[in-house]
Amino acid sequence: MIDGATPNTRVIKHSIVIAGHRTSISLEDAFWHALKEIANDEDLSLASLVAQIDAARGSANLSSALRVFVLNRALKRR
């Protein structure tokens, strides 16, 4: 196993309301927990953070945009 890797990479479907409509997002637990931490750090609700990412994602898939957002945030903190 790579140092820092987690064996829990199962994808879970989460329901969230963004921009006034309910949507489902399929994400690995690690990304979901990271999004919650980022929202907390930014003093935002999880729905508000996801809505911001959704508004800026262009034609990208929402789940992919969320993963890339978390990755970019982690890389900036290095």
Image: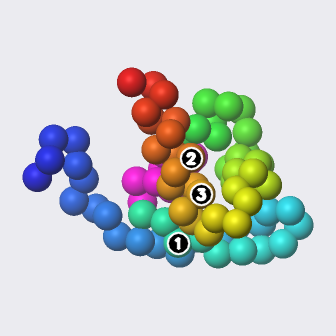
- Element at label 1: strand
Residue 60 picture location, percent across and down: 64, 65
From what the image shows, is residue 50 above or below residue 64?
above
Residue 71: image location, x then y, percent:
46, 44
Q: Position of residue 25 (x, y in %)?
A: 60, 70
Looking at the image, residue 72 lies above or below residue 54: above
| Residue that carries the numbered disc 2 in the rendered image | 69
Q: Left or right: 67 with respect to 52?
A: left
**Magenta-colored span:** 29-36
Identified at 46% across, 72% down, the residue is 12
User: Mark 2 Cα within 10 Å, few/some/many (few <14, many 20+)?
Assistant: some
* Residue at x 53%, y 72% (from the top left corner): 26
Q: Farthest residue in the top direction? A: 78
Confirm or deny contact between disc 2 and disc 3 (CB under 8 A).
yes
Say what secondary structure mark 3 lies in.
helix
What kind of residue is marked 3? Ala
Q: Quadrant of the C terminus?
A: top left
Q: Residue at x 11, y 52 (%)?
A: 1
Pointer 3: what residue? 65
Determine if the magenta segment contains residue 57.
no
Which quadrant of the figure has residue 10?
A: bottom left
User: Circle 1 sits on which residue?
Assistant: 26
| Residue 74 sits in quarter | top left
- Labels 2 and 1: the sequence-earlier one: 1
Q: Disc 2 versus disc 3: distance between alpha carbons?
A: 6 Å
Give the residue type at disc 2: Phe
Q: CA distance from mark 1 to mark 3?
A: 12 Å
